[in-house]
Image: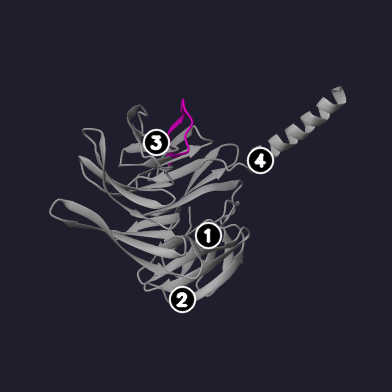
Amino acid sequence: MLKNITEKNKIFLTILLLFIFTINISFALSVSPNNEYCCYLYLYNKYYLFDLKEKKIIKNVEMPDYYDNVFFISKDKVAFVKGQKIEIMDSLILKPEAQFNFNQTIRDLKVVKENDTESFFLIFTDYSIRYFKYDKNKGIINLITQKDLVKYHDSLIKDNEIFVADNMFISIFRESSFLFFKWLSSKKIKLEDVVYSLDVGKNKYAVLHYVSTSKRKVSFYTLNGMEITTKELEGNYQKLWFDKSEKEVVLFDNSNSIKILSQNGEIRESNIYGGKIDQMQKFNEGFILVVIEDKPNFVVLDSNFNM
């Protein structure tokens, strides 16, 4: 009997260990709308606030609760996400000021614009984009409008337009208004493969396509969706961004280095670090990386990938 229990325990422990090591570690990195700070959530409850100009951590605290993600909702407020709910807090004080339930799991949050009294932001779920207004004085969030998506993967805001990697489409949204009514006007560009990530240049798109779990494809398109060039790559790349020249793209894959792909198909490795790059984001002065060694380390790169 003891032998049987031991064997069962071994099987249980094996399954448990497999489960633990296949879970995706929860983390998020969000840049403030004024491009001065970034906030980062590591291992569900370890919160960091980093000054992008001074290049130093100004807040590092273990939260009393566990969260899925954290995003800036204005220049000095952050939204901690847990499933379908967000808790709004001051990015430094970290005391809950308001809580809201959105009835769908939140995938992403991006600020569109803000002033002294209001912040306008987008919440992306798997199958919708919703546009909200946050009244800073009253602590109230109101839904302005919403649109359906095919399947959300990635997004960016540029020149008052919202570009969404929407399954096999690039969906483009713009705020329209008449009198007191506001809505999101939209158009779609159909591509041949799933759009995993995208960036928008002055006259072209860079698109990371999902091929399989170990393969991706990077394509460059004109703004009306005509393919310029494409390159298939081995690897589990998750996001891409244009560099300053818009002749190359930076690829992020959770390894210990960043990869740079030129439009003519040449790829090179750059900036090898002593740990895994856990997250990476673009901001107006360059890129911010979080490198995990014994603890999270923040690395700021300029637009030419120099520290």
Q: Residue at x 38, y 52 (%)?
A: 128
Mark nearer the viewer, 2 or 3: 3
Q: CA distance from mark 2 to mark 3?
A: 40 Å
- Kindly state the secondary structure of the residue where label 1 is placed: strand
| Residue lying farthest to the front in this orientation | 1
Quadrant into which the N terminus falls: top right
Image check: 281 left or right of 21? left
Q: CA distance from mark 3 to mark 4?
A: 27 Å
| Mark 1, other Cα within 10 Å: few <14 / some 14–19 / many ≥20 | many
Which residues lie in the magenta part?
A: 56-69
Q: CA distance from mark 4 to mark 2?
A: 39 Å
* Residue kind at label 1, given as amino acid type: Leu
- Kindly state the secondary structure of the residue where label 2 is placed: strand
Residue placed under numbered mark 1 in the picture: 251
* Residue kind at label 4, given as amino acid type: Phe
Front residue of 200/214: it is 214
- Kindly state the secondary structure of the residue where label 3 is placed: strand
* Residue kind at label 2, given as amino acid type: Glu
Of mark 1 and mark 2, the one earlier in the sequence is 2
Is 124 covered by the magenta stretch?
Answer: no
Mark nearer the viewer, 1 or 2: 2
> In x, y percent, where is residue 280?
48, 50
Q: CA distance from mark 1 to mark 3?
A: 31 Å
Image check: 249 left or right of 79? right
